Image: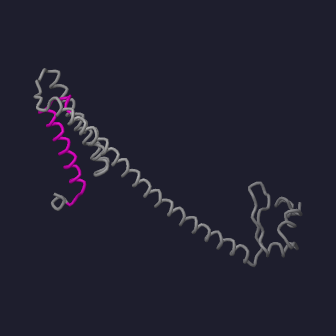
Amino acid sequence: LLRWSRSATVLGLVQAFSMLTIMVFMALLDGGLDAPSLYWVPLIPMAAAVTVGPIGTISTLIAGVVSLVGLYILTEQGYAFPNYTGGLVRIRFDMLALISGLAFAALVGWLYERHTRHELNRLSDGVRGLRGRLGQSEERYRQLFEQLPIGMYRTTPSGEIVLANAACLRLLGYTSLDDFRQAHPTVGSLYAN
């Protein structure tokens, strides 16, 4: 099927719908809405989510609801479902269905956590790379700013002097940025009235 369709999505959908069909068919043959096989029906969209994605989840969810509504209608109309498993066999089957359903849910949770952790690590590596490139960019900017032969300074929006390069300090007769800031707390004090 995978070779024919060339799509894992088609294979996942066929698998999910096959599981759903088997569970509903077992319910038709063994107790209707009381059938332990129906314990698996809510897990099938979860399986489809893992194997196929949103399309599988939504389509199996709709098919599961339609199937359960169909069983409910049959029950309301008085259809007598056969009960092939009874007594101890039924209890064992109930327990097996519940335990396997719990194991499956745990597996899906583990796979989801593993996938999420992998994605978070991938994103974290990307952020680390961006931080490294940002640091390199800042260093190039700082070197360019410091090595320019013309005087340059940077201010806050309110006019407070934040940074000045060596050429600016030499041009204005200062030896350090702190001395320059003390003499001119804002850029307005650099200009004559």
- Please give the range of residues in magenta: 6-35
Q: How many marks?
A: 0
Q: Is residue 168 magenta?
A: no
Closer to the camera in the image, 30 or 174 = 30
Question: Residue 8 is drawn in which quadrant?
Answer: bottom left
Q: Is residue 26 above or below residue 122?
A: above
Can you see residue 103?
yes
- Relative to 56, is 145 on the left or the right? right
Give the quadrant of the N terminus: bottom left
Closer to the camera in the image, 19 or 17 = 19
Closer to the camera in the image, 163 or 80 = 80
- Relative to 121, is 18 on the left or the right? left
Residue drawn at 18 percent across, 32 percent down: 88
Image location (x, y in percent) of residue 188: 84, 59
Q: Is residue 15 magenta?
A: yes
Task: Identify the colour scheme used.
Answer: one colour
- Relative to 70, is 43 on the left or the right? right
Give the quadrant of the C terminus: bottom right
Q: Is residue 166 above or below residue 64?
A: below
Can you see residue 41?
no
Label the magenta part by its dominant secondary structure: helix
Q: Is residue 151 above or below residue 122?
A: below
Image location (x, y in percent) of residue 129: 53, 66
Image location (x, y in percent) of residue 49: 31, 47
Image location (x, y in percent) of residue 51: 28, 52
